[in-house]
Image (cartoon, rainbow, N blue to C red):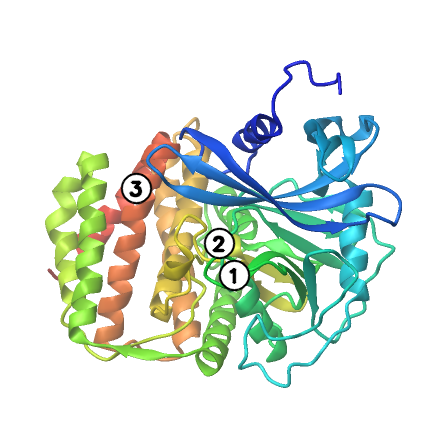
Amino acid sequence: MTDNPAAQTLHDQLATFVGEARWFGGKGREFEVTDVRRLGVLGASDGGPVVLLSLVELGFSGGDRELYQLPLALYSERQERLGHALVAVDDVEGFGPSYVYDAVHDREAMDHLLRAFAEATPHDAGGVETGAGAPSSTTGRSDGLTFHRLPGHDLDTTAHSTLFSGEQSNSTVMFGEDSLLKVFRKVTPGVNPDIGVHEVLTRAGSDKVAALYGWLEAREKSGDGEPLQLAMLQQFLRTASDGWDLALTSVRNLFAEADLHADEVGGDFAAEAARLGEALSEVHALLAEHFPTADRSTDEMGALGATMAQRLDAAVAIVPELAAYAPALRGVFTAVGRLDGVTVQQIHGDLHLGQTLRTVKGWKIVDFEGEPAKPLAERVRPDSPWRDVAGMLRSFDYAPRVSAHQWGDTDGGAAQREYRAAEWSARNCTAFLEAYAGRALTGAEQVLLDAYVVDKAVYEVVYEARNRPKWVPIPMSAIQRLVERSPE
């Protein structure tokens, strides 16, 4: 074709596209496309575009390898409406000269995927113990792909797709107000915890998550025989509001009322914080019921404390200001090593207010994938539920500080807003924690919770130093407060 003036190879064009994509996690590192594998084909005989589900292997300097999924829409002619999503112009094996577009931007391409899910026959696995990977359904409609469906919902195949612009590590497509398709961009062989956890909670009848409708796998297995899970289809929460946005709105209402306290303003958030604590407690209980649990020994807890201390040492090297607080923080981590018999289980793993949605039917917890940057083995490893609780407590503390930081001090009211931010944080942390636990914490629980909170705050300091240096004082002030109240 003559429409590619640079005359790049397909690998070069794919490398350019991936390197500039918002969801690419390797920005700033040198890499090359080392392999492209075709996992499956949709629409080859149905008219409209051909959809290729492709897996691109990237090789980084230093020898690291990562896999990224590219759903590609192939057209024989240029599509002006998709000019912003052009990936490559190339002679594609089996389909000839083609204009290749990122399929998530193309309604016709996404319609192929939706109809493939709709044509899969739902199958009740007969229980929730099996987890993702059980034979929920199989369809021979597509080449190289297996569509799994859970019973209980008839998909609206007339719904048009819309790409959600706020996604970062993955791509999410909304089908009207009926369903959401999350396309995993970075693919790791094995059961994706977002699918595995949602399947279990959906089969258990939990109303604290968006119901899982199905998921997509390649029939090809990884070299280790593990599944390659490519996407998940789930309930669209029509009335949902982001938990982080709701918290910020509450804080702004408080700041706007100069003579009122946090429990006196119309936007008081404490009742919602309590409901969220109850929702998390219910989810944790279901996860403990349907996933394996274990008790960690003193040696294992000592190893956990040592790992937290190592992360602190690494953080001090990046943000030297942490050094003044390091001895006290190490004392918090050392205390963890004296614990014994700590129960661990499946948890969320990356919980904060941005992973929650408020609907007319209550709170929903979303995105059980864990921290995308971590290896899958680490993301699925059982951990203490108090890690999730700590993440929420840090989020409740972050929201008012962020709002105060963004407000600035043009009116001379910064000191008063700092006081009110502390008041809002304390009120909502208390409401959340009391509702979650339903009782006073034991000494061991408090030690563990404190350690997870400190560990999270240290992570936040490093993150802000690397990404938003002006925000470093937010977690640093939290570190100072944590040290001041520490008994060590």
Query: Badge 2: how crowded within 10 Å, few (<14), some, or many (20+)?
Result: many
| Helix, strand or loop status at disc 3 | helix
- Counting from the top left corner in percent of width and height, residue 352 is at 45, 55
Amino acid at circle 3: Val
Who's the residue at 12% across and 58% down the image? 331
Sequence-earlier tag: 3 or 1? 1
First-in-chain label (3 vs 2):
2
Q: Residue furthest bottom?
A: 126
Residue farthest top in this picture = 5
Q: CA distance from mark 3 to mark 1?
A: 29 Å
- Name the mark nearer the viewer: 3 or 1: 1
Q: Label 1, label 2: how many angstroms apart (C-alpha)?
A: 8 Å
Residue 444 position, x and y percent, is 22, 74
Q: Residues within 10 Å of mark 1 (few under 14, many from 20)?
A: many
Which tag is nearer the camera, tag 1 or tag 2?
A: 2
x, y percentage for residue 412? Answer: 38, 30
State the residue position of label 2: 188
Q: Are marks 1 and 2 in contact (CB under 8 Å)?
A: yes
Q: Quadrant of the C terminus?
A: bottom left
Left/right placement of residue 376 relative to residue 328 reads right
Residue drawn at x 65%, y 40% as measured from the top left: 165
